[in-house]
Amino acid sequence: MNKPKEILVTAFALFSLFFGAGNLILPPYLGFKAGQDWFLVTMGFALTAVLIPVLGIFAHAKLQGTIYDFGKKVSPLFSSIYCIVIYVIAISLPAPRTASVTHEMAIAPFFNTSTLVTSTIYFLLVFVFVMNRNKILDLIGKFLTPLIGIILLSIILVGIITSPFELSKPLLEAPFSGGILEGYQTFDAIGAVVVGAVIVISINMRNNKTFEEKKDLITKSGLIAGFGLMVIYTGLILCGSLFQSKFSLDASRTEVLIGLSNFTLGYTGSLFLSVLVALACFTTAVGIVTGTSDYFKGLFNGSQMAYVVTAILGCLIGVLVGSYNVGFIIDVALPALMFIYPITIILIVLNVLPDKYATKIVFRAVVLITFLFSIPDFLKYMMPLEDIQYFLGFIPLSEYSLAWVFPSIISFLLMNLYVNKFRKEKL
């Protein structure tokens, strides 16, 4: 049996590994843009930033392997390529972004140092934690996450109590889909398949549990972490909407979050926020680099040298990319997300479903269709050509950059009808 304390520690670790740069700066900005439509935005954001990531943890509880297991029903080649793409994206964009956010919000307001100095020191510390990965659950779950939660809840509670309670008109044309797409920028679906594997490996290193005990531990921890994310996101989005009138219309994501902390906790709030940003971003970076190093260690037959070399390369990339500003990294990330996020969501959902509804042929058909219908959305952000816009006009939800959704659902239903019919004929 899993002890409640063990479940809570693992849940806290999961929450902290999820809760990084994007999770902090995106919700208040969404609320600021949403105004009166804050609830619709919250529901859209929760879909891709809470529900899908939690389902990803459920999939890990079911598979109890690595990220490779998510795509192996399609084919070994596809799964290998998918893993490499995911880890390259994760270690090149969201991990370095945590250093960039830390500099802009926690270092620049107090110290006159360059972003390169910040990212260098930052990823030296990340490397130290990654090389002591057997202590990750204890360090993150017992100490860092509770502190993050206390600071965040303080900002939210004081914000709701002291806000002017003025909900202005929304600045978003499509609040629900806007929330969905902004949820992409958290990278949490990708985070689920990456850090979920870190949790599985860490549990295996620490405990001699049965398959069912580990499944129970991971599932319950995922639910608690998801609930925590939902509470924090809702609170930050609501606060952003309540304080909308306090910001200029062209305020940036970081300006809204910094302003919110000043309005709620004053100068002390800025200090608290600095600690929060550093902790939240740091734990996510540690999770990403550890997960990537684990994967390449597995590729080279458990070689510790491969683990160390990957960790060094990941931290060097972090130093270089992390020296750029947050806005630049977010802009660069968007096309990659439009391409890989739909495939990741589909793989998570198919792996959670009962095996009878997610056979190999279903996997292959749905993933292929999702891949094909993600290409126009990807190209739209890479090179907005008129021909692409014309083609997208015939696909439902394409105007919201969700052209893949209906084709994926239809292919899933049709393939299951075909599989069931084939089974009956065989009988």
Image: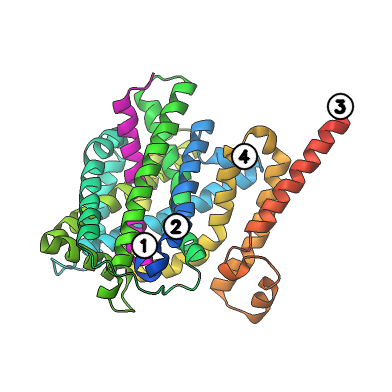
Give whichever of discs 3 and 1 has the lower sequence position: 1
The one nearer the camera, 132 or 47, is: 47
Mark 3 touching mark 4, by CB under 8 A?
no
Q: CA distance from mark 4 to mark 1?
A: 33 Å
Q: How many marks?
A: 4
Badge 2 amino acid = Phe
Residue that carries the numbered disc 2 in the rendered image: 45
On whether residue 56 falls in the magenta region, the answer is no
The disc, 3 or 4, on the residue closer to the chain's N-terminal end is 4
In primary-sequence order, the first of circles 3 and 2 is: 2
Looking at the rendered image, the quarter that the C terminus falls into is: top right
- Tell me how the rendering is colored: rainbow
Earlier sequence position, callout 2 versus callout 1: 1
| Residue 2 sits inside the magenta stretch | yes
The answer to the question of whether label 2 and label 1 lie on touching residues, with beta carbons closer than 8 A, is yes
Q: CA distance from mark 4 to mark 2?
A: 29 Å
Q: Nearer the viewer, mark 4 or mark 2?
A: 2
Nearest to the eye among marks 3 and 2: give it.
2
Measured as percent of width and height from the top left, residue 34 is found at 40, 68
Q: What kind of element bears circle 1? A: helix
Residue 378 coordinates in the image, percent (x, y): 58, 67
Does residue 290 appear anywhere in the picture?
A: no
**Residue for badge 1:** 26
Q: Amino acid at mark 3?
A: Leu
> Which residue reaches farthest front?
165
Give the residue number, with chain letter if any, for mark 3.
427
Task: Name the residue carrying label 4.
Answer: 72
State whether the magenta stretch is mostly helix, strand or loop: helix
Please tell me which residue lies in front, 309 or 28: 28
Tell me which label, 4 or 2, sits earlier in the chain.
Answer: 2
Span colored in magenta: 1-30
